Image (cartoon, grey):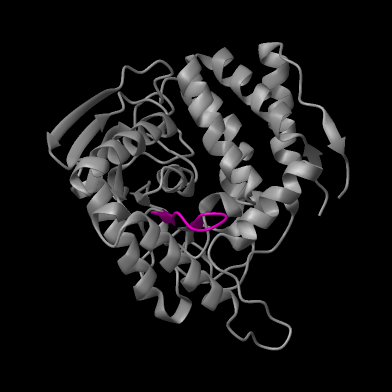
């Protein structure tokens, strides 16, 4: 696989400059960049800086409000709503996480809905913010229909991610998954890298399995032969992020890839925070997580295998990429070069060519 690596700081500076040039205000550029950095550092390349060209176009052409006036309204002691004013999804969801933590410190549990939002990137970025505050976080959203149902032959759900994070000794426990077999951007990444897709993850226009990224018309739900489980989890994310918030259902959301780039997509998200101090107690929770993770990591693996806790692989990859640089695929680099030329901003400097 041929990639080029860039220093994380250099990519962040370029990203913020590109988003500002497209019409984003400072907070929107910073939050979008912070979310993409989470993806790129932790090895979630489909939701990292390869999303930057998409976000630049969405802001420039009006789909995403680059200068939103966000509003938070508390509805009950442990609930509230963030109106994201059609801004970037990261802007509204980071704010929802902040308010969920504040409310949960008083009420023990708090949920904040995000309305009039847009694509927010890696769901784990927001759950992790809650865990870093010492609370348990759960984040979900829906997206435009691109995933068939189990035994279905047409698009129905979005990739509808579910992410959770919890404070723990050392690094937080971090769980982040799409309810599709793979995220849509994995298909685009495979196209750029000229790689085949794993079997049972994508389908052609008739709902038949395909490993050719060029032939993908929809994704399969998580679970392969038991794909009804993935479809059910997608439905859970749909109910909380769309039905609970009054926003568009996945089949009603305008497609991520256009052709309409000027109409806001009216997407929702759902953020939940639980304060361990209201239950077993903060220290008891940390002690319990420590015991749980020690037992999990000490569980006997199969020959040649390695037992990992959710987040272990991501934290290891983040440490490596901080040292060696963040890899970007050729298509993303070409798109960034076009952005740099159009906005008259310098490209980030590559740190190595072929890892």
Which of 120 and 213 lies nearest the eye of the viewer? 120
The location of residue 314, given as percent across then percent down, is 62, 56
User: Does 243 sit above or below residue 304?
Assistant: above
57 in magenta:
no
Q: Residue lying furthest left in this view? A: 76
Answer whether residue 162 is magenta in the image: yes
Residue 107 % position (x, y): 18, 45
Q: Residue furthest front?
A: 283
Kindly tell me whether residue 24 is visible in this rendering.
Answer: no
Residue 349 in sight = yes
What quarter of the picture does the N terminus occupy?
bottom right
User: In the rendered view, does 217 fall on the left or right side of 301?
Assistant: left
| Residue in view at x 42 percent, y 20 percent | 62
User: Image quadrant of residue 70?
Assistant: top left
Q: Quadrant of residue 187?
A: bottom right
Please tell me how many numbered marks the rendered image carries.
0
What span is in magenta? 160-174
Q: Write the residue at 77% across / 35% down.
A: 6
Q: Can you tell which quarter of the image residue 323 is in?
A: top right
């Amino acid at each position: 696989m041929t990639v080029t690596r860039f220093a994380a700081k250099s990519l962040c500076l370029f990203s913020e400059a590109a988003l500002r040039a497209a019409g984003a205000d400072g907070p929107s550029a910073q939050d979008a960049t912070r979310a993409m950095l989470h993806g790129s550092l932790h090895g979630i390349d489909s939701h990292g800086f390869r999303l930057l060209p998409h976000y630049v176009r969405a802001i420039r052409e009006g789909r995403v409000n680059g200068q939103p006036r966000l509003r938070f309204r508390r509805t009950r002691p442990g609930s509230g709503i963030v109106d994201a004013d059609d801004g970037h999804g990261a802007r509204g969801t980071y704010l929802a996480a902040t308010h969920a933590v504040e409310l949960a410190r008083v009420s023990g549990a708090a949920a904040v809905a995000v309305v009039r939002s847009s694509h927010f990137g890696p769901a784990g970025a927001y759950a992790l913010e809650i865990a870093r505050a010492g609370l348990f976080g759960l984040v979900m959203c829906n997206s435009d229909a691109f995933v068939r149902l189990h035994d279905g032959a047409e698009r129905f759900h979005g990739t509808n991610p579910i992410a959770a994070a919890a404070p723990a000794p050392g690094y937080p426990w971090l769980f982040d998954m799409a309810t599709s077999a793979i995220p849509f951007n994995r298909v685009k990444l495979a196209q750029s890298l000229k790689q085949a897709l794993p079997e049972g993850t994508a389908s052609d226009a008739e709902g038949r399995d395909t490993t050719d990224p060029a032939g993908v018309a929809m994704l399969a739900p998580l679970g392969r032969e038991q794909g009804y489980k993935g479809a059910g989890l997608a439905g859970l994310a749909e109910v909380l992020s769309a039905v609970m918030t009054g926003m568009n259902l996945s089949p009603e959301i305008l497609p991520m890839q256009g052709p309409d780039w000027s109409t806001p997509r009216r997407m929702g998200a759902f953020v939940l925070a639980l304060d361990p101090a209201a239950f077993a107690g903060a220290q008891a929770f940390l002690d319990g997580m420590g015991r749980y993770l020690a037992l999990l990591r000490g569980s006997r693996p199969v020959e040649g295998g390695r037992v990992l806790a959710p987040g272990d692989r991501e934290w290891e990859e983040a440490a490596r990429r901080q040292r060696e640089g963040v890899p970007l695929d050729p298509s993303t680099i070409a798109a960034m070069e076009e952005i740099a030329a159009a906005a008259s901003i310098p490209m980030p400097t590559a740190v190595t060519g072929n890892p």
